[in-house]
Image: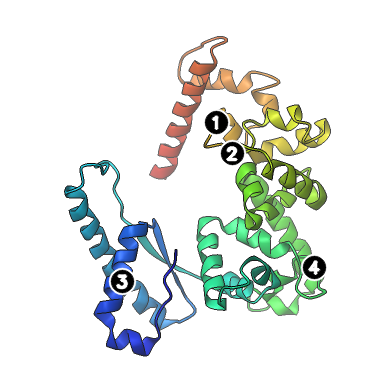
Amino acid sequence: PHLTSPHLDYFSSHRSQVKSIIQTFLVDMQPTVIAVSTSAGQVAKSWKRWLEDVAMEAVQQHRQEREFDEDEDDDVEWEPEVIHVVDDIGHIFAQSKRSEAEFPEYAMSLRKAISLARYVQEPLAELTYMWAQGVGAGMRGEEMLYLNLHPIWKEVNAQHLLNRLERALINAVNDVGVDINLAAAHTHRAAMLSFVAGLGPVKAHALQQVVSRLKDGGLESRAALLEKNLLKQKTFTNAAGFLRVLNKNKFVNPIDDTRIHPESYITNNWAQQICFQINEALVEDNDEAFYDQITQVAQRIKQERMKQ
Protein backbone atom coordinates (compact mmCIF):
# COMPACT_ATOMS: atom_id res chain seq x y z
CA PRO A 1 0.00 0.00 0.00
CA HIS A 2 1.19 3.53 -0.73
CA LEU A 3 0.06 7.12 -1.00
CA THR A 4 0.96 9.42 -3.87
CA SER A 5 2.16 12.83 -2.76
CA PRO A 6 -0.02 15.65 -4.13
CA HIS A 7 1.30 18.61 -6.13
CA LEU A 8 2.48 21.51 -3.95
CA ASP A 9 -0.31 23.77 -5.22
CA TYR A 10 -2.94 21.21 -4.24
CA PHE A 11 -1.24 20.64 -0.90
CA SER A 12 -1.26 24.37 -0.12
CA SER A 13 -4.99 24.70 -0.75
CA HIS A 14 -6.03 21.35 0.81
CA ARG A 15 -3.57 21.09 3.69
CA SER A 16 -6.01 19.77 6.32
CA GLN A 17 -7.48 17.20 3.93
CA VAL A 18 -4.04 15.88 2.98
CA LYS A 19 -3.06 15.78 6.65
CA SER A 20 -6.13 13.71 7.50
CA ILE A 21 -5.42 11.21 4.69
CA ILE A 22 -1.79 10.76 5.73
CA GLN A 23 -2.71 10.48 9.40
CA THR A 24 -5.25 7.74 8.67
CA PHE A 25 -2.73 5.94 6.48
CA LEU A 26 -0.12 6.01 9.28
CA VAL A 27 -2.58 4.67 11.85
CA ASP A 28 -3.59 1.83 9.52
CA MET A 29 -0.05 0.86 8.43
CA GLN A 30 1.83 1.73 11.65
CA PRO A 31 5.29 2.17 10.11
CA THR A 32 8.27 2.23 12.45
CA VAL A 33 10.14 4.75 10.30
CA ILE A 34 9.04 7.55 7.96
CA ALA A 35 11.82 8.48 5.54
CA VAL A 36 11.95 11.91 3.89
CA SER A 37 14.10 12.40 0.79
CA THR A 38 16.68 15.19 1.03
CA SER A 39 16.49 16.13 -2.65
CA ALA A 40 14.13 19.06 -2.02
CA GLY A 41 16.61 20.90 0.22
CA GLN A 42 14.92 23.32 2.62
CA VAL A 43 11.50 22.06 1.58
CA ALA A 44 12.54 18.60 2.78
CA LYS A 45 13.29 20.04 6.23
CA SER A 46 9.85 21.63 6.33
CA TRP A 47 8.24 18.35 5.23
CA LYS A 48 10.09 16.48 7.98
CA ARG A 49 8.87 18.89 10.69
CA TRP A 50 5.32 18.72 9.33
CA LEU A 51 5.36 14.92 9.16
CA GLU A 52 6.67 14.75 12.73
CA ASP A 53 3.58 16.69 13.84
CA VAL A 54 1.28 14.48 11.76
CA ALA A 55 2.96 11.33 13.13
CA MET A 56 2.51 12.59 16.70
CA GLU A 57 -1.20 13.15 16.14
CA ALA A 58 -1.46 9.73 14.48
CA VAL A 59 0.09 8.13 17.56
CA GLN A 60 -2.38 9.94 19.82
CA GLN A 61 -5.28 8.81 17.61
CA HIS A 62 -3.99 5.24 17.74
CA ARG A 63 -3.76 5.34 21.54
CA GLN A 64 -7.31 6.63 21.83
CA GLU A 65 -8.65 3.94 19.50
CA ARG A 66 -6.75 1.26 21.38
CA GLU A 67 -8.40 2.22 24.67
CA PHE A 68 -11.73 1.04 23.24
CA ASP A 69 -10.37 -2.10 21.59
CA GLU A 70 -10.15 -5.05 23.98
CA ASP A 71 -8.23 -7.15 21.44
CA GLU A 72 -5.29 -4.73 21.25
CA ASP A 73 -2.07 -5.63 23.06
CA ASP A 74 -1.40 -2.87 25.61
CA ASP A 75 2.29 -3.80 25.79
CA VAL A 76 2.91 -2.88 22.15
CA GLU A 77 3.72 0.81 21.79
CA TRP A 78 3.81 2.41 18.35
CA GLU A 79 5.75 5.61 17.79
CA PRO A 80 7.30 6.12 14.34
CA GLU A 81 10.55 7.99 13.80
CA VAL A 82 10.80 10.57 11.00
CA ILE A 83 14.25 10.70 9.38
CA HIS A 84 16.03 12.30 6.43
CA VAL A 85 17.53 9.99 3.79
CA VAL A 86 20.01 11.01 1.09
CA ASP A 87 18.31 9.89 -2.10
CA ASP A 88 21.22 9.34 -4.52
CA ILE A 89 20.73 5.57 -4.52
CA GLY A 90 16.95 5.87 -4.97
CA HIS A 91 17.39 8.33 -7.85
CA ILE A 92 19.82 5.98 -9.64
CA PHE A 93 17.56 2.97 -9.12
CA ALA A 94 14.50 4.80 -10.44
CA GLN A 95 16.27 5.40 -13.77
CA SER A 96 17.86 1.96 -14.02
CA LYS A 97 16.87 -1.08 -16.05
CA ARG A 98 16.59 -2.95 -12.76
CA SER A 99 13.65 -0.81 -11.70
CA GLU A 100 11.99 -1.19 -15.10
CA ALA A 101 12.29 -4.97 -14.83
CA GLU A 102 10.98 -5.12 -11.25
CA PHE A 103 8.26 -2.47 -11.46
CA PRO A 104 7.37 -1.89 -15.12
CA GLU A 105 3.99 -0.32 -14.29
CA TYR A 106 5.19 2.03 -11.54
CA ALA A 107 6.00 5.70 -12.01
CA MET A 108 9.61 6.76 -11.55
CA SER A 109 8.79 8.61 -8.32
CA LEU A 110 7.32 5.43 -6.80
CA ARG A 111 10.33 3.37 -7.86
CA LYS A 112 12.54 5.92 -6.13
CA ALA A 113 10.44 5.72 -2.96
CA ILE A 114 10.72 1.91 -2.96
CA SER A 115 14.50 2.11 -3.22
CA LEU A 116 14.67 4.64 -0.37
CA ALA A 117 12.54 2.39 1.82
CA ARG A 118 14.74 -0.60 1.04
CA TYR A 119 17.84 1.46 1.79
CA VAL A 120 16.49 2.40 5.22
CA GLN A 121 15.72 -1.24 5.97
CA GLU A 122 19.04 -2.68 4.73
CA PRO A 123 21.60 -0.23 3.26
CA LEU A 124 24.05 -2.95 2.22
CA ALA A 125 21.39 -4.81 0.25
CA GLU A 126 20.61 -1.73 -1.84
CA LEU A 127 24.30 -0.93 -2.37
CA THR A 128 25.17 -4.46 -3.47
CA TYR A 129 22.07 -4.50 -5.69
CA MET A 130 23.58 -1.54 -7.55
CA TRP A 131 26.60 -3.71 -8.21
CA ALA A 132 24.57 -6.59 -9.60
CA GLN A 133 24.57 -5.31 -13.17
CA GLY A 134 25.97 -2.45 -15.18
CA VAL A 135 23.94 0.10 -17.10
CA GLY A 136 23.77 -0.40 -20.85
CA ALA A 137 26.81 -2.40 -21.93
CA GLY A 138 28.81 -1.25 -18.90
CA MET A 139 30.72 -3.24 -16.33
CA ARG A 140 29.46 -4.60 -13.04
CA GLY A 141 29.22 -1.92 -10.39
CA GLU A 142 29.16 0.92 -12.89
CA GLU A 143 26.01 2.40 -11.34
CA MET A 144 27.98 3.18 -8.19
CA LEU A 145 30.14 5.61 -10.16
CA TYR A 146 27.10 7.90 -10.33
CA LEU A 147 27.18 8.37 -6.56
CA ASN A 148 28.66 11.62 -5.31
CA LEU A 149 30.86 10.31 -2.51
CA HIS A 150 33.72 12.82 -2.68
CA PRO A 151 34.50 16.22 -4.34
CA ILE A 152 37.30 14.71 -6.49
CA TRP A 153 35.49 11.43 -7.07
CA LYS A 154 35.40 11.95 -10.83
CA GLU A 155 39.16 12.57 -11.03
CA VAL A 156 40.05 8.98 -10.06
CA ASN A 157 40.31 6.18 -12.62
CA ALA A 158 36.94 4.41 -12.82
CA GLN A 159 38.38 0.89 -12.63
CA HIS A 160 40.46 1.79 -9.57
CA LEU A 161 37.33 3.14 -7.90
CA LEU A 162 35.37 -0.01 -8.67
CA ASN A 163 38.15 -2.21 -7.32
CA ARG A 164 38.16 -0.27 -4.04
CA LEU A 165 34.38 -0.20 -3.85
CA GLU A 166 34.19 -3.94 -4.41
CA ARG A 167 36.68 -4.57 -1.60
CA ALA A 168 34.76 -2.23 0.71
CA LEU A 169 31.51 -4.08 -0.02
CA ILE A 170 33.16 -7.46 0.58
CA ASN A 171 34.48 -6.29 3.95
CA ALA A 172 31.15 -4.74 4.98
CA VAL A 173 29.01 -7.72 3.97
CA ASN A 174 31.25 -10.22 5.72
CA ASP A 175 31.43 -8.05 8.83
CA VAL A 176 27.67 -8.23 9.36
CA GLY A 177 26.80 -11.48 7.56
CA VAL A 178 23.85 -12.27 5.29
CA ASP A 179 20.46 -13.72 6.24
CA ILE A 180 20.44 -16.44 3.59
CA ASN A 181 16.67 -17.11 3.69
CA LEU A 182 15.86 -13.43 3.36
CA ALA A 183 18.40 -12.98 0.56
CA ALA A 184 16.97 -15.96 -1.31
CA ALA A 185 13.41 -14.66 -1.02
CA HIS A 186 14.03 -11.12 -2.34
CA THR A 187 15.77 -10.17 -5.58
CA HIS A 188 17.21 -6.92 -4.27
CA ARG A 189 18.79 -8.69 -1.26
CA ALA A 190 20.20 -11.63 -3.24
CA ALA A 191 23.15 -9.60 -4.51
CA MET A 192 24.65 -9.59 -1.00
CA LEU A 193 25.39 -13.30 -1.34
CA SER A 194 27.91 -12.72 -4.15
CA PHE A 195 30.09 -10.73 -1.72
CA VAL A 196 30.23 -13.52 0.87
CA ALA A 197 33.74 -14.93 1.24
CA GLY A 198 33.99 -18.29 -0.49
CA LEU A 199 30.99 -17.82 -2.79
CA GLY A 200 31.31 -15.28 -5.59
CA PRO A 201 28.64 -14.47 -8.22
CA VAL A 202 28.21 -17.97 -9.74
CA LYS A 203 27.97 -20.00 -6.52
CA ALA A 204 25.90 -17.28 -4.86
CA HIS A 205 23.34 -17.32 -7.68
CA ALA A 206 23.11 -21.12 -7.64
CA LEU A 207 22.66 -21.13 -3.85
CA GLN A 208 20.01 -18.42 -3.99
CA GLN A 209 18.03 -20.31 -6.62
CA VAL A 210 17.99 -23.55 -4.60
CA VAL A 211 17.17 -21.95 -1.24
CA SER A 212 14.38 -19.86 -2.79
CA ARG A 213 12.61 -23.09 -3.78
CA LEU A 214 12.71 -24.60 -0.29
CA LYS A 215 9.40 -24.71 1.62
CA ASP A 216 8.56 -23.74 5.22
CA GLY A 217 10.63 -20.56 5.23
CA GLY A 218 13.79 -21.97 3.69
CA LEU A 219 16.81 -23.37 5.54
CA GLU A 220 16.44 -24.39 9.18
CA SER A 221 20.16 -24.50 10.04
CA ARG A 222 23.65 -23.89 8.75
CA ALA A 223 24.30 -27.62 8.93
CA ALA A 224 21.54 -28.06 6.32
CA LEU A 225 23.82 -26.42 3.76
CA LEU A 226 25.93 -29.58 3.89
CA GLU A 227 23.13 -32.03 4.66
CA LYS A 228 21.16 -30.90 1.58
CA ASN A 229 24.36 -30.78 -0.49
CA LEU A 230 23.85 -27.08 -1.21
CA LEU A 231 27.55 -26.34 -0.64
CA LYS A 232 30.64 -28.50 -0.91
CA GLN A 233 32.72 -28.95 2.23
CA LYS A 234 35.45 -26.48 1.28
CA THR A 235 32.98 -23.80 0.21
CA PHE A 236 30.96 -24.39 3.37
CA THR A 237 34.06 -23.98 5.53
CA ASN A 238 34.88 -20.67 3.85
CA ALA A 239 31.37 -19.19 3.69
CA ALA A 240 29.30 -20.64 6.55
CA GLY A 241 30.47 -18.14 9.17
CA PHE A 242 29.11 -15.28 7.07
CA LEU A 243 25.72 -16.88 6.29
CA ARG A 244 23.09 -16.24 8.94
CA VAL A 245 20.04 -18.49 9.28
CA LEU A 246 16.66 -17.27 10.53
CA ASN A 247 13.38 -19.10 9.91
CA LYS A 248 10.07 -17.81 11.25
CA ASN A 249 8.44 -21.22 10.67
CA LYS A 250 10.98 -23.39 12.48
CA PHE A 251 13.14 -23.35 15.58
CA VAL A 252 16.69 -22.28 14.73
CA ASN A 253 19.80 -22.53 16.86
CA PRO A 254 20.44 -18.89 17.93
CA ILE A 255 24.14 -19.21 17.04
CA ASP A 256 23.16 -19.85 13.42
CA ASP A 257 22.20 -16.16 13.37
CA THR A 258 25.65 -14.97 14.44
CA ARG A 259 29.08 -14.64 12.88
CA ILE A 260 30.38 -17.57 14.94
CA HIS A 261 31.74 -20.25 12.62
CA PRO A 262 30.08 -23.71 12.79
CA GLU A 263 33.44 -25.25 13.69
CA SER A 264 33.10 -23.52 17.07
CA TYR A 265 29.73 -25.00 18.01
CA ILE A 266 28.94 -27.89 15.64
CA THR A 267 32.28 -29.57 15.00
CA ASN A 268 33.44 -28.59 18.50
CA ASN A 269 31.62 -27.38 21.61
CA TRP A 270 33.73 -24.28 22.24
CA ALA A 271 30.87 -21.79 21.96
CA GLN A 272 28.71 -23.81 24.33
CA GLN A 273 31.47 -23.98 26.91
CA ILE A 274 32.10 -20.24 26.73
CA CYS A 275 28.40 -19.46 27.15
CA PHE A 276 28.09 -21.79 30.12
CA GLN A 277 31.12 -20.23 31.75
CA ILE A 278 29.75 -16.73 31.25
CA ASN A 279 26.55 -17.73 33.00
CA GLU A 280 28.50 -19.65 35.66
CA ALA A 281 26.84 -22.88 34.69
CA LEU A 282 27.93 -26.04 32.95
CA VAL A 283 25.22 -28.26 31.56
CA GLU A 284 26.39 -31.23 29.52
CA ASP A 285 24.39 -32.68 26.62
CA ASN A 286 21.41 -30.41 27.20
CA ASP A 287 20.57 -28.53 24.01
CA GLU A 288 17.56 -26.71 25.45
CA ALA A 289 19.63 -25.32 28.31
CA PHE A 290 22.34 -24.35 25.84
CA TYR A 291 19.91 -22.36 23.69
CA ASP A 292 18.63 -20.56 26.78
CA GLN A 293 22.19 -19.64 27.70
CA ILE A 294 22.85 -18.30 24.21
CA THR A 295 19.73 -16.14 24.32
CA GLN A 296 20.77 -14.69 27.68
CA VAL A 297 24.25 -13.88 26.41
CA ALA A 298 22.84 -12.23 23.28
CA GLN A 299 20.51 -10.09 25.39
CA ARG A 300 23.39 -9.03 27.62
CA ILE A 301 25.50 -8.03 24.64
CA LYS A 302 22.61 -6.05 23.16
CA GLN A 303 22.07 -4.22 26.45
CA GLU A 304 25.76 -3.33 26.70
CA ARG A 305 25.79 -1.99 23.13
CA MET A 306 22.73 0.16 23.82
CA LYS A 307 24.51 1.66 26.84
CA GLN A 308 27.42 2.63 24.60
Give the residue number, with chain letter if any, for mark 4: 160
Q: Is residue 77 above or below residue 28?
A: above
Q: Which mark is residue 250?
A: 1
Q: Secondary structure at mark 1?
A: loop
Rounded to the nearest angstrom, the CA distance separating label 3 from label 2 is 36 Å
Rounded to the nearest angstrom, the CA distance separating label 1 from label 2 is 8 Å
Residue 222 vs residue 73: left or right?
right
Give the residue number, with chain letter if any, for mark 2: 217
Give the amino acid type for the residue marked by disc 2 in the picture. Gly
Residue contact at pointers 1 and 2, CB within 8 angstroms: yes
Q: Position of residue 295 (x, y in %)?
A: 47, 28
- Mark 4 or mark 3: name the one nearer the start of the chain: 3
Rounded to the nearest angstrom, the CA distance separating label 4 from label 2 is 40 Å
CA neighbours of label 4 inside 10 A, class few (<14), some (14 to 19), many (20+): few
Viewer-nearest of discs 1 and 4? 1
Q: Is residue 307 above or below residue 35?
A: above
CA neighbours of label 2 inside 10 A, class few (<14), some (14 to 19), many (20+): some
Residue 64 vs residue 85: left or right?
left
Give the residue number, with chain letter if any, for mark 3: 21
Give the amino acid type for the residue marked by disc 4 in the picture. His
Q: Residue at x 64, y 77 (%)?
A: 95
Give the amino acid type for the residue marked by disc 3 in the picture. Ile
